[in-house]
Image (tube, rainbow, N blue to C red):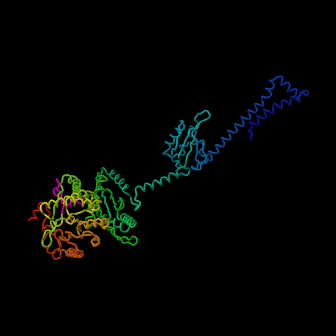
């Protein structure tokens, strides 16, 4: 064990001094011996205490020296540890002057210990914007309160910014008096940079569409909200284009979602290339996109012209051929346009443009439509109609009319049941006003059940009056047919009112999709085996009709009145009607011409071999009692 100078001094003082004194006595007096010296000490205990005291003092001095050496070694080791620590450590006195600066602090800042010792830490090394806050933190530590995880930037000797996470504690002397602050920091510059990159990517993922890379619905909502707030006091007008791909579902279902996804990506690219700098293109979801035009101070008509021009550029770009794998595609898009002021809400703006887009789908010429006051009034009317359906069912506002059907000999061979609505405020409404709305908003099930029961009940009443009709045609929606209990419900009504199935013809519109035909085929066959007959309604307005003929048990086809109206002047419609009749005859089916209103139309249809006729030339749809009088007359 290494002894300090204090240990050496203690040993000399405690051992050598008494020994030297004894030897001096022996040398100075030759008569004295060790035994005599011992005898004298034994006779006087005080001499023992005096002569041995230096020994004990020397031991104590040696022990004290050892402890002091130990403390110095610990202090040196601690200083070495602080100096070589991986974290930057600094110390300041009560005046804020640096009195400690380790190697890590020197490495991070570029300032050596000799360059910073005695300098004011805050004034010399902290960024200007953070000087006050860092000073407050250090003052808290000087007052005895520790500070944890305080982040601030400082600038290195080269001028680079370094982000530091600081933990500070009070430094006290042996008497417990505050003598300064010790701060332990952590360089979090790279950590912050990585965190910001991750946050940026997350923010981008939250506000952008993964498939197309366009801003998404959330981004659009936030962006437009801020734009509306920023222009609250201005008279400027903005415009929104709502875009929807036509028949996109058909691409997905027939060619697969990978082709559909690629189509959406290409459409997104063409959209961005078709707009101006400053226009915002977003994907709302599915096959829906929007283009937001900036606010500007101009007349609404001028803004409308600009919006229409942009919409025309978009449709032209989207309609160009698209090659995906081995498939040659053409995308078609419908665009609804609405104007808005800063006082409008985001939801209102989107809804108006969306409504205009649905109108655009009916405009085959351009597929572009504006939201106008007339459109608003029409939509309000639709809402009024839709909201009244429940009341109509409970208050018996619906009623049935029946339109007679005649054969070539002008004999009554059946009727078609047609629903009407005696609206308390809007008057008598034909089915075209409310049926499509009911189907769109899932209200058709209740109406369909009411129609079926009304017709079955009416047939029973006619029977009681002695009237027997060969057949009654009832229009059935696809959603009705899709119901799991439709067959059981129909049979239940048949038994309840004692109506034979062969007296009923169920009319199904030809616009029903092939997918629906596939899922309904078993139900069609089941009902046909029970005696119900099927009519393919509105023939010529749908698609894949020949396939449907072959696969479904139709016994009748109805030629849509759109072909009958100008059959005398339109050679295409004449040829098409002739082809329908010939095809139906090939399959052994009856042909009913709808909307026959003139003798000329009737004569042409007779010449083409049409079996049955229905239209104003013979009779309008009438109420049951009037039909009974008509039959009797």
Task: Give how far across and how far down residue 35 sits, in percent.
Answer: 88, 28
Q: Nearer the viewer, residue 94 or 177?
A: 177
Residue 323 appears in the rendering: yes
With respect to residue 470, does 391 lie above or below? above
Left or right: 333, with 5 as reference point = left
Is 34 above or below relative to 87? above
Q: Nearer the viewer, residue 176 or 252?
A: 252
Looking at the figure, which quarter contains the N terminus? top right
Residue 453: x %, y % from top left: 21, 58
Residue sticking out furthest to the top: 43
| Number of residue marks | 0
- Name the residue furthest left: 633
Depth check: 540 or 289 in front? 540
**Image quarter hosting the C terminus:** bottom left
Residue occupying the far right of the picture: 31
Residue 429 located within the stretch drawn in magenta: yes
- 114 relative to 630 in the view: left or right: right
* Quadrant hosting residue 471: bottom left
Whole-percent x and y of residue 251? 35, 67
Q: Is residue 93 magenta?
A: no
- Apparent side of residue 90 relative to residue 204 in the rendered image (left or right): right
Q: Is residue 489 above or below residue 146?
A: below
Residue 568 appears anywhere in the view: no
Q: Is residue 24 left or right of residue 129?
A: right
Which image quarter: residue 16? top right
Residue found at x 89% / y 28% = 33
Is the residue 54 above or below the residue 122 in the image? above
Q: Position of residue 496 (x, y in %)?
A: 21, 58
Q: Which region is colored magenta? A: 417-437
Q: Quadrant of residue 402?
A: bottom left
């Amino acid at each position: 064990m290494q002894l300090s100078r204090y240990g050496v001094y203690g040993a000399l003082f405690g051992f050598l001094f008494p020994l030297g004194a004894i030897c001096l006595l022996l040398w100075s007096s030759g008569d004295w011996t060790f035994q005599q010296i011992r005898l004298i000490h034994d006779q006087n205990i005080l001499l023992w205490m005096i002569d041995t005291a230096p020994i004990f003092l020397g031991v104590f001095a040696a022990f004290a020296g050892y402890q002091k050496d130990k403390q110095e070694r610990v202090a040196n080791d601690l200083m070495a540890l602080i100096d070589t620590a991986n974290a930057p450590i600094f110390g300041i006195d009560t005046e804020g002057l640096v009195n400690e600066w380790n190697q890590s602090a020197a490495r991070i800042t570029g300032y050596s210990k000799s360059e910073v010792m005695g300098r004011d830490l805050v004034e010399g090394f902290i960024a200007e914007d953070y000087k006050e806050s860092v000073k407050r933190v250090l003052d808290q530590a000087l007052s005895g309160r520790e500070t944890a995880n305080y982040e601030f930037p400082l600038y290195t000797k080269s001028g680079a910014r370094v982000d530091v996470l600081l933990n500070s504690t009070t430094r006290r002397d042996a008497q417990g008096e505050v003598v300064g602050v010790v701060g332990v920091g952590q360089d979090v510059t790279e950590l912050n940079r990585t965190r910001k990159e991750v946050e940026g990517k997350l923010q981008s993922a939250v506000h952008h569409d993964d498939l197309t890379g366009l801003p998404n619905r959330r981004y659009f909502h936030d962006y437009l909200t801020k734009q509306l707030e920023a222009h609250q006091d201005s008279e400027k007008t903005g415009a929104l284009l709502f875009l929807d791909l036509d028949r996109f579902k058909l691409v997905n279902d027939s060619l697969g979602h990978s082709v559909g996804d690629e189509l959406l990506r290409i459409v997104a690219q063409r959209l961005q290339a078709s707009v101006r700098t400053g226009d915002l293109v977003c994907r709302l979801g599915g096959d829906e996109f929007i283009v937001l035009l900036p606010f500007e101070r101009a007349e609404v008509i001028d803004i409308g012209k600009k919006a229409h021009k942009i919409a025309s550029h978009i449709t032209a770009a989207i309609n160009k051929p698209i090659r995906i794998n081995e498939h040659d595609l053409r995308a078609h898009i419908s665009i609804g346009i609405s104007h808005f002021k800063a006082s409008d809400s985001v939801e209102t703006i989107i809804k108006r443009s969306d409504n205009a887009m649905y109108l655009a789908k009916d405009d085959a010429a351009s597929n572009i439509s504006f939201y106008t006051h007339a459109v608003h009034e029409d939509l309000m009317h639709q809402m009024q109609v839709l909201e009244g359906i429940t009341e109509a069912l409970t208050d018996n506002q619906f009623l049935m009319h029946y339109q007679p059907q005649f054969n070539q000999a002008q004999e009554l061979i059946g009727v078609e049941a047609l629903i009407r609505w005696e609206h308390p405020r809007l008057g008598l409404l034909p089915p075209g006003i409310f049926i499509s709305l009911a189907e769109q908003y899932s209200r058709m099930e209740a109406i369909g059940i009411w129609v079926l029961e009304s017709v079955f009940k009416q047939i029973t009443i006619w029977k009681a009056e002695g009237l027997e009709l060969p057949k009654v045609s009832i229009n059935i929606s696809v959603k009705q047919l899709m119901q799991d209990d439709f067959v059981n419900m129909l049979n239940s009504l048949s038994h309840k009112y004692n109506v034979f199935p062969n007296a009923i013809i169920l009319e199904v519109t030809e616009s029903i999709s092939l997918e629906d035909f596939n899922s309904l085929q078993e139900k069609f066959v089941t009902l046909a085996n029970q005696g119900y007959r099927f009519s393919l309604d509105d023939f010529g307005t749908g698609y894949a009709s020949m396939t449907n003929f072959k696969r479904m048990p139709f016994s009748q086809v109805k030629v849509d009145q759109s072909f009958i109206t100008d059959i005398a002047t339109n050679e295409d419609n004449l040829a098409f009607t002739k082809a329908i009749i010939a095809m139906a005859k090939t399959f052994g089916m009856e042909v009913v011409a709808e909307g026959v209103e003139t003798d000329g139309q009737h004569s042409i249809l007779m010449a083409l071999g049409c079996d049955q006729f229905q239209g104003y030339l013979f009779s309008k749809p009438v109420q049951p009692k009037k039909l009974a009088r008509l039959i009797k007359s």
